Amino acid sequence: MTLVVKSLRDIDWDNWKPKDPATLVFVTEGERVLLIRKKRGLGAGKINAPGGRLEPGETPLEAAIRETQEELRITPKQLSYAGENLFQFVDGYSIHVYVYAATDYDGEPTETEEASPIWTDTNAIPYEEMWEDDRLWVPLVLEGVSFFGRYLFDDDVMLDHDLEVNVSTGGTS
């Protein structure tokens, strides 16, 4: 189903429901951040943070930990809620992403069938290999600034966005 939308104003956000709730976790260590190259699923081939879809009955925080364990074989610790992003794609797909930051972890980042770990300096993040919206809000995660974003995509192309900073949306559960 292709939606006839050209901007965020064309979407009824009051009644918007995502097809999938999901998470991302940004693990930092000093001036480095742990990213992944996704091997499959939405965004395969792109660089992103570990994360993925919630399972039934799972909270966003539980999913964030589980997905990081599955993708990199590490357990993120000292997680803090960073913000939320709502993505609508013109093909009809939609996803609500809860974003977390972690300052510690147990284990050793390990390549899996889902992802390859990539440590990068926070001042050298490879945005050109990431989703187009990441350059707008990932710096906020690393600065500890909360946010709430809405994005409209046509495949890999961002058509429109709205990003609010320093907001509390209560998505910590």
Image (spheres, rainbow, N blue to C red):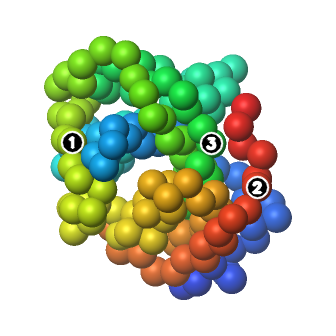
Residue found 76% across the figure and 53% down from its top? 169
Residue 92 in the figure: left or right of residue 123: right
Whether the residues at callouts 1 and 3 have beta carbons within 8 Å, the answer is no
Whether the residues at callouts 1 and 2 have beta carbons within 8 Å, the answer is no
List the residue tagged with mark 1: 119
As measured in the structure, the alpha-carbon distance from the residue carrying label 1 to the one carrying label 2 is 29 Å
As measured in the structure, the alpha-carbon distance from the residue carrying label 1 to the one carrying label 3 is 21 Å
List the residue tagged with mark 3: 81
Q: Is residue 162 above or below residue 74?
A: below
Q: Quadrant of residue 61?
A: top right
Mark 1: amino acid: Trp
x then y, percent, for residue 37: 21, 43
x then y, percent, for residue 142: 45, 54
List the residue tagged with mark 2: 168
Asked whether residue 144 appears in the rendered view, the answer is yes
Element at label 3? strand
Q: Which tag, 1 or 2, sits closer to the chain's start?
A: 1
Q: Nearer the viewer, residue 136 or 139?
A: 139
Asked whether residue 3 appears in the rendered view, the answer is no
State which quarter of the image contains the C terminus: top right
Q: Nearer the viewer, residue 22 or 81?
A: 81
x then y, percent, for residue 102: 48, 35
